[in-house]
Amino acid sequence: MANDAFDADLIVIGSGVMGGIVASQVAKAGKKVIILEAGPRVDRREIVETFRNAPVKLSLANAKLQGAGSPFPSMPWAPSTYGDYLQYEGPVKYNTSYLRVVGGTTWHFGSALWRMIPNDFKIQSLYGRGRDWPIGYDDLEQYYNKAELELGVTGMDGQDESGQGGHPMPPRTMPFPMKQLNSSYMFTTLAEKLSVGGFNPVLEPHGRASRPYGNRPVCAGNNNCNPVCPIGAKYDGSQHIDLAERHGAKLLDNSPVYKVEAGEDGKITAVWYKKPDNSEHRLTARYFVLAAYGIESAKLLLISTSDKYPNGIANSSDQVGRNLMDHTGISMNMLTKEDIWPGEGPTELLVYLNQRDGAFRKDYPSYKIKVRNTVPTSPDDRRLHQEGHHGLQARRDDPPVFGPFAQLGDRLRTAAARRKPRHAIEDQVRRARHPGSGPLLFGDGLLECRPRPWPGRPEQDRPAA
Amino acid sequence: MSTDNHRSGSFLSHPLARRSLLRGTVAIGGLAVLSSLAAPLSAAAADDDVQGFTKLSEFLTGYDLDPVLGARFLAALAKRSKTLKADIAALQQVVNQSGVKNMDAFLALKPADPNVMKTATKIVSAWYLGVVGDPEDAELITYEKSLMYRPTKGLLPIPTYGPGPNAWGPKPGSKI
């Protein structure tokens, strides 16, 4: 239904999960859609190979902290956030790591896909903090259903996701599209043992297929949810871009938008983008959707200045680009007395939400305790080598398992089996960290806690010494 | 060939058939390695170096090892050390002189020369991590065949090489 006066009915800026879903819905409705993406298309196989061939393999947070790269490409016109593209000011480094590629940051997300709970919509009236939403959970519920079907969410029906071990929460009018994956031995063991201490286990809803879903195969326990799922069992935004294109949407990759134009009436009239050859192009549309993530969206609005809009587009409040909040976290290592084998199945599933909701929110924000489930073999091996265990310094206090030749192997196997699940305490409402947060009281000597100093993002892997 | 079992014999055991099949490939890799080590060498000499290095590595680690990887590890190590060939020869000599059949026995002798142990350590680290070099110039030789993954093979996945759908749940140790 394109009107000749416009290049498109809808132009979407950003090809991530938001842009992709909007674009695919509108394209399905027969409208002419153009998607503009600053970065390139990427090929899953190539990203997986780049990951496998990288000498230093790090978790997302550590790759960023330690200056290591990402297997995703960095282009001159869309530099990777793993380099020096983002300039920091202020006392605390903002370790964000979004991806500038077709499909966006969901390529490397952990794929947790939570609904909010009803109380989240009224924290001012309940807890005297922030603001109440103008709508409630019930108003959104049917849209949560639609979103979960689009994204293909796997979850466990009947859980109290408010973390109190009570009735099913939040209320649902539709079961999860897919039933939960198998719990791993570690998750089952921890859930049993920690329940005694009042910790209510919750298996998080997420975007890994537990049955064939669209083009997605079933999660195969590759334990590589980030930086990339090797088989595409985990949802990422490229899947909705594919869908949009199948319905006639046009994707322009390597096309960073640098200016948004608004008319006298304030309505957006056009956007400008560049191609890698530096040529400048203008596109018009009836409607525009800006879905370029927290930083890029604000950046684009702020640089789109004109005589009428000297502070940028949509910025009469002067609040655009302010109040940016990190997904804060702290991690701790645990050593268990018995073998519990982290690393089976997906990289995360078991969480604790005891501090999800309650009167404490008057004083500090809610948070989540996530049990990290990455394969510990590589970091353990690096540590053993750093500590001087090279298979040449036999220690007999660990029982040999594989025979007399494998001193290092024995230690490695024992270390891997007992290695501490990592608990990332994540500030659910993205508020400032609270000094009182993070009580990892897993008592009775089940787990020995070794806190790391703040900012203490998980030190998942260390580069070889 | 199964490379997953521990060797029960000495490092002098007979080369496996696959090794002979692969010798041509190895020789090419070996040439590249040794071209930086001064004297011109024949393909046969390079082949011998790789064979010797792989055998020595098998003695040090107690695993059957792939000579194709051996050639690549040797090349990467040689690129970073001008004295590597001499160091390996020194270590090999101490091992030979000791007359012992396995690493445990060798360690029991407590070799006096720290350089010998340093060379051995360097070689073992490389095979375990699959990586040679410092972080700044680290070079990956192998990912899924690095020795660190063998002790937990069948128990924990090598990331990106998962066990398949729903292949987890029972205690992993119970699977051995």
Image (tube, coloured by chain):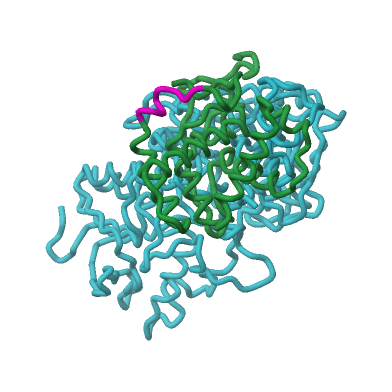
Chain colours: A cyan, B green
Q: Quadrant of residue A188?
A: top right
Measuring from the top left, give residue A341's x and y in whole percent.
65, 27
Whether residue A164 is visible here, answered yes or no, is no
Q: Is residue A456 magenta?
A: no
Q: Main secondary structure of the magenta part?
A: helix
The residue that appears at 37% across and 82% down in the rendered structure is A306
Residue ranking furthest to the right: A444
Is residue A337 shown left or right of residue A139? Answer: right
Q: How many marks?
A: 0
Measuring from the top left, give residue B11's x and y in whole percent.
58, 27
Residue placed most toward the observer, A457 or A259:
A457
Measuring from the top left, give residue A247's x and y in whole percent.
21, 43
Whether residue A230 is visible here, answered yes or no, is yes
Is residue B96 shown left or right of residue A142? Answer: right
Task: Tell me if residue A65 comes above or below residue A397 in the rendering.
Answer: below
Residue placed most toward the observer, A191 or A286:
A191
Task: Tell me if residue B100 comes above or below residue B30 in the rendering.
Answer: above
Residue placed most toward the observer, A29 or A464:
A464
Look at the image and give the residue range highlighted in magenta: B14-21
Is residue B25 shown left or right of residue A392? Answer: left
Q: Quadrant of residue A345?
A: top right
Measuring from the top left, give residue A53's x and y in whole percent.
44, 46
The residue that appears at 66% across and 43% down in the rendered structure is B121
Q: Is residue B17 magenta?
A: yes
Residue ranking furthest to the bottom: A307
The residue that appears at 68% across and 33% down in the rendered structure is A408
Is residue B174 shown left or right of residue A110? Answer: right
